[in-house]
Amino acid sequence: MEIAVVMKIKEGFHVNARETTFDYLIPTDLKAEPPAGFKLGAVKYPKGALQKFNFAKDQALNVYSDTVILLLPVTVETNAPLGEQRIPLKLRYQACNNEVCLPPVTLPVDAVIHVSSGESHPSHPELFAKP
């Protein structure tokens, strides 16, 4: 199973991709604190796109824009409690436009998982479509 974190980036803005062009840039970063009964895998970050901006004329930067989906693999262990469970996430990013960058922010996000003893059903299967 996977948790999808959908970033909808405002038009005219971008955020640095996970793999930044320069070490001093703030990468997009998703962290999670799994409750008892859950095991988390490594976050799957999409590939960024190289774009040029006024503030970095000589070098294209690796960024995300528009809509980006981060995927976090989750294993529900046999000791996981049944019912609605929350996995707290923290999404850190820095938004910029063509001229300036805003201060980096860390946004708390809760992922909600419904644990049952039956078959699993994804909430938004369109987010997990395989290419």
Image (tube, grey):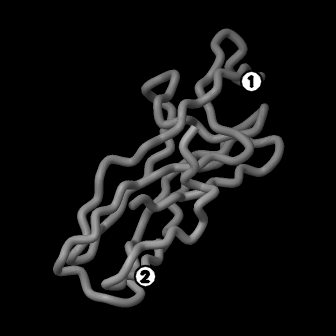
Task: State which quarter of the image contains the C terminus.
Answer: top right
User: Which corner quadrant of the image does residue 127 belong to?
Assistant: bottom right
Residue 119 percent location from the top left of the image:
39, 76
Residue 81 location (% of width, % of height): 26, 87
* Depth check, front residue: 54 or 6: 6
- Residues marked 1 and 2 touching at CB (< 8 Å): no
Q: Residue at x 58, y 46 (%)?
A: 94
- The residue lying at 64 percent from left, 26 percent from top is 49
Q: Considering only order in the chain, which callout, 2 or 1, is on the residue closer to the N terminus?
A: 1
Residue 27 position within the rendered picture, expressed as x and y whole percent measured from the top left: 48, 39
Foreground mark, 1 or 2?
2
Secondary-structure class at tag 1: strand
Image disc number at residue 53: 1
Three-letter code, disc 1: Phe
- Give the amino acid type for the residue marked by disc 2 in the picture: His
Q: Please tell me which residue lies in front, 112 or 30.
A: 112
Secondary structure at badge 2 equals strand
How far apart are the alpha carbons under marks 1 and 2? 43 Å
User: Residue 78 lies in what quarter of the image?
Assistant: bottom left
27 up-or-down from 9: above or below: above
Q: Residues within 10 Å of mark 1 (few under 14, many from 20)?
A: some
Number of marks in the rendered image? 2
Which quarter of the rendering shows the N terminus? bottom left
Q: Work out which residue is located at the far bottom of the displayed protein and give it.
A: 83
Using the image, determine if residue 82 lies above or below residue 126: below
* Rendered residue at 44%/62% (across/down): 90
Horizontally, residue 102 falls left or right of residue 110, namely right
Residue at 51% of width from left, 68% of height from top? 122
Above or below: residue 53 compared with residue 86: above
> Where does label 2 land, which residue?
114
